Image (cartoon, rainbow, N blue to C red):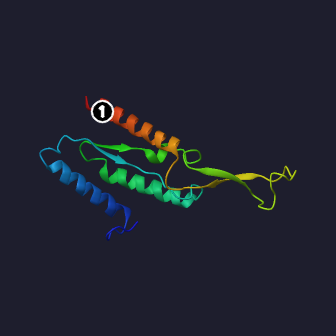
């Protein structure tokens, strides 16, 4: 995670906090609700170490930004279904066995296709999370 000299997650979160402060310092930006997505890791969904990094990043963002006025978090990281929201296919563990073989012991495993862009139901799921967050935070503001 190194973007224009950002060396760690705290630095990135503080830069986002500065940007939010800049937006809120303008006359028109003082009452604007700001939504911060806590995004999931969109690489190899079976790589637990990458998921831990994404969870740590989300926790850091929350810790740094939680006291900012009129900010709301969208919990994509805890609500996306990695097993069904992305393109997958099923393939045999043993590549030398095909459907024509009568070997019932050969198991199929999911193989990820596009590991960055979810399929349509994944985008619908993201929309549900976004809509739910806006409804929740909108009711709190009333």
- Against 39, residue 124 (above or below) is above
- Against 83, residue 16 (above or below) is below
Q: Is residue 78 left or right of residue 105?
A: left
Total tally of numbered discs in the picture: 1
| Residue for point 59% across, 47% down | 83
Q: Is residue 122 left or right of residue 140?
A: right
Q: Is the N terminus in the top left, top right, bottom left or bottom right quadrant?
A: bottom left
SS label for mark 1: helix
Q: Residue furthest left?
A: 27
| Residue for point 48% across, 45% down | 78
Q: Is residue 110 left or right of residue 1?
A: right
Q: Residue furthest bottom?
A: 5
Residue 14 position, x and y percent, is: 29, 59
Q: Quadrant of residue 28?
A: top left
State the residue in front, 2 or 98.
98
Q: Which residue is mark 1?
A: 138
- Against 27, residue 19 (above or below) is below
Residue 124 position, x and y percent, is: 47, 39
Sort mark 1 into few (<14), some (14-19) or many (20+) by Cα contacts within 10 Å: few
Q: Is residue 24 left or right of residue 39?
A: left
State the residue in front, 60 or 136.
136
Q: Quadrant of residue 128?
A: top left
| Residue for point 40% across, 34% down | 132
Q: Residue furthest front?
A: 100
Residue 129 position, x and y percent, is: 43, 39
Q: Is the C terminus in the top left, top right, bottom left or bottom right quadrant?
A: top left
Residue 29 position, x and y percent, is: 17, 45
């Amino acid at each position: 995670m190194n973007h224009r000299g950002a060396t760690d997650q705290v630095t990135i979160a503080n830069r986002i906090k500065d940007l939010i402060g800049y937006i809120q310092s303008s006359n028109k930006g003082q009452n604007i609700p700001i939504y911060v997505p806590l995004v999931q890791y969109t690489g190899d969904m079976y790589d637990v170490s990458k998921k831990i990094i994404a969870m740590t990043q989300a926790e850091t963002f929350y810790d740094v930004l939680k006291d900012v006025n009129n900010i709301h978090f969208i919990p994509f990281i805890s609500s996306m279904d990695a097993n069904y929201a992305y393109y997958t296919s099923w393939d045999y563990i043993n590549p030398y066995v095909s459907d024509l073989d009568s070997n019932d012991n050969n198991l199929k495993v999911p193989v990820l296709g596009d590991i960055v862009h979810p399929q349509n139901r994944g985008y619908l799921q993201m929309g549900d999370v976004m809509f739910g967050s806006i409804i929740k935070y909108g009711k709190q503001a009333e």
